[in-house]
Image: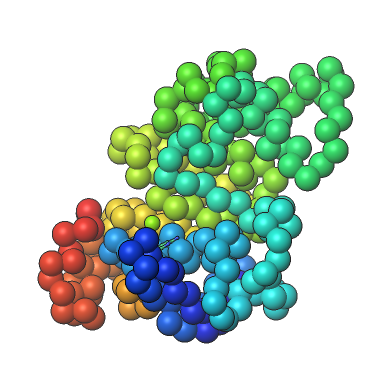
């Protein structure tokens, strides 16, 4: 289980003022659970993922995984079991390396680099089979530099790369927000497949309410650093974007905020 306990985080803004993002956040996530995270701009969604990833440390409180305190574990250590995909397709891949080089690099994360020609060929075939399942034609571009690929292709590659080593935790920060709806669906379906097949504990931020309902086991809505909605099971399945917006308005009574969501 992933547990966040009494997390407090205040940032110092560029203007020198304090922005208190979390004031005692608690959250428990079961192993293998797939959570979708929604919430208005500035609610603390990305900060939540960064606190788990360890790129940000809380002022107080703990993040623990299977009862082990990982709050202050070094990033390189966390990188071996936590993976993240960002919104920007250029973040997750090395642009001047080929598709094959990117995949082998990811595949070798934490392992000794040792490939023979035969092994290379075998790996190439394996990657080709993974890529061809996506139907985006990337398998035909194994020796192409990644910067030549489309944003959707790069994002797909980034997802495959971070999941090759079957991380324990997968963090997705609006990883399909920059893509067209068709490519976004391909990546979301692939995300779901990978997460389910490997039983990876996953947090996926999205601003698309429909996607937040369609995917995952549980929806969490953040508002000003607080979890104002936490719905799973039958209750989640019965949700609609309209009902989610209504819930949001009921809890906060702030109609104007609904404008930031897209259904
Ligand atoms: N490094 C930082 N320095 C100062 N303020 C920050 C920093 N990171 C986030 N914030 C502020 O914290 C709040 C939450 O940000 P964030 O987690 O990025 O929101 P979300 O992803 O939900 O839109 C925002 O008000 C944002 O401006
Ligand atoms: Mg964000």
Ligand 1 quarter of the rendering: bottom left
Residue drawn at point x = 76 percent, y = 37 percent: 108
> As drawn, is 122 to the left or to the right of 12?
right
Q: Nearer the viewer, residue 161 or 43?
A: 43
Image vertical order of residue 100 relative to residue 164, above or below? above
Residue drawn at point x = 58 percent, y = 38 percent: 160
Q: Quadrant of residue 234?
A: bottom left
Residue 212 visible in the current orientation: yes
Residue drawn at point x = 68 percent, y = 53 percent: 79
Residue drawn at point x = 61 percent, y = 74 percent: 63
Residue 199 visible in the current orientation: no
Colouring style = rainbow
The total of numbered circles placed on residues is: 0
Image vertical order of residue 64 relative to residue 166, above or below? below
| Residue lying furthest left | 255
Q: Quadrant of residue 186?
A: top left
Q: Position of residue 10 (x, y in %)?
A: 44, 74
Q: Nearer the viewer, residue 90 or 234?
A: 90
> As drawn, is 116 to the left or to the right of 256?
right
> As drawn, is 68 to the left or to the right of 255?
right
Q: Quadrant of residue 106?
A: top right
Image vertical order of residue 74 relative to residue 187, above or below? below
Q: Nearer the viewer, residue 247 or 146?
A: 146
Q: Position of residue 148 (x, y in %)?
A: 48, 19
Q: Position of residue 249 (x, y in %)?
A: 18, 74
Q: Quadrant of the C terminus?
A: bottom left
Q: Position of residue 90 (x, y in %)?
A: 48, 34
Q: Quadrant of the N terminus?
A: bottom right
> As drawn, is 23 to the left or to the right of 1?
left
Q: Nearer the viewer, residue 171 or 15?
A: 15
């Amino acid at each position: 289980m992933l547990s966040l306990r009494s997390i407090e985080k205040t940032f110092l803004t560029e203007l020198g003022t304090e922005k208190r993002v979390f004031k005692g956040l608690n959250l428990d996530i079961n192993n293998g659970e797939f959570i979708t995270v929604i919430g208005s701009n500035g609610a603390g969604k990305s900060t939540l993922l960064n606190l788990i990833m360890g790129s940000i440390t809380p002022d107080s409180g703990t993040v623990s995984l299977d009862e082990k305190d990982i709050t202050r574990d070094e990033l390189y250590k966390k990188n071996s079991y936590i993976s993240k995909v960002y919104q920007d397709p250029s973040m997750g891949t090395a642009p001047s390396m080929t598709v094959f080089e990117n995949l082998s690099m990811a595949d070798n994360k934490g392992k000794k680099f040792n490939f023979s020609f035969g092994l290379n060929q075998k790996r190439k075939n394996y990657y080709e089979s993974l890529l061809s399942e996506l139907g985006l034609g990337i398998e035909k571009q194994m020796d192409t530099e990644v910067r030549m690929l489309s944003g959707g292709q790069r994002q797909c590659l980034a997802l495959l790369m971070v999941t090759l080593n079957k991380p324990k935790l997968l963090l997705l920060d609006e990883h399909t927000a920059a893509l067209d709806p068709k490519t976004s669906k391909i990546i979301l379906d692939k995300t779901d497949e990978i997460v389910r097949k490997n039983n990876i504990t996953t947090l996926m931020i999205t601003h698309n309410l429909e996607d937040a309902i369609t995917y995952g086991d549980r929806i969490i809505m953040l508002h000003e650093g607080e979890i104002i909605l936490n719905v799973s099971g039958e209750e989640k399945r019965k949700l609609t974007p309209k009902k989610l917006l209504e819930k949001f308005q009921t809890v906060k009574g702030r109609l104007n905020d609904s404008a930031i969501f897209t259904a």
